[in-house]
Image (tube, rainbow, N blue to C red):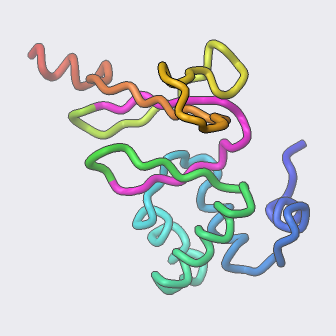
Amino acid sequence: MEQSVGDLLKGRGLRSTAQRRAVLTALRGHPHSTAADLETRVAESGGLSRQGLYNVLEDLTKAELVRCIEPAGSPTRYELRVGDNHHHLVCRRCGLIEDVDCRVGAAPCLTPGKDLGFAVDEAEITWWGLCAECQRTAEA
């Protein structure tokens, strides 16, 4: 059974405010949402100022309830899939983003070719290309 958003917040030591619950609820079923996407969805449940939204997103990201990704040339995206080692495919034309499970499993799945003294614990991989729909329209 899926945990309630209130329980998720409490489990991470955060107060269960209406704003935090609204943002987490707005992300359910909508991975890779932008802040603008979330602002629109949260407005339907009473709204939140833009600064308030960014403050909530920062709190949720720091608490590791939300992951932010920043594909080049795209606004920051937010998702609830955290704590696993997954990557992303991004369509160059329409911006569709798909999750890709890591084939290695454990983080980091890649290591730098040269030891520069870092203790590497994560590698973010983004593949770029055209999604199936954009390939079809390009061929037409």
| Image quadrant assignment for residue 10 | bottom right
> Residue 74 at what x, y percent from top left?
31, 50
> Residue 125 at what x, y percent from top left?
47, 29
Residue for point 60% across, 38% down: 118
> Residue 113 at what x, y percent from top left?
48, 19
Q: Work out whether residue 41 or residue 117 is closer to the camera in this orientation and state it.
A: 117
Image position of 121 (left or right of 14): left
* Membership of 84 in magenta stretch: yes
Q: Work out whether residue 50 or residue 107 is closer to the camera in this orientation and state it.
A: 107
> Residue 22 at what x, y percent from top left?
66, 71
* Membership of 42 in magenta stretch: no
Residue for point 43% across, 58% down: 34
> Is 124 above or below relative to 24?
above
The quadrant of the rendering that contains the N terminus is top right
The quadrant of the rendering that contains the C terminus is top left
Image position of 134 (left or right of 65): left
Which residue lies most toward the left here?
Answer: 140
Q: Which residues are magenta?
A: 75-91
> Is 69 above or below relative to 90?
below
> Is 8 above or below relative to 55?
above
Residue for point 52% across, 75% down: 54
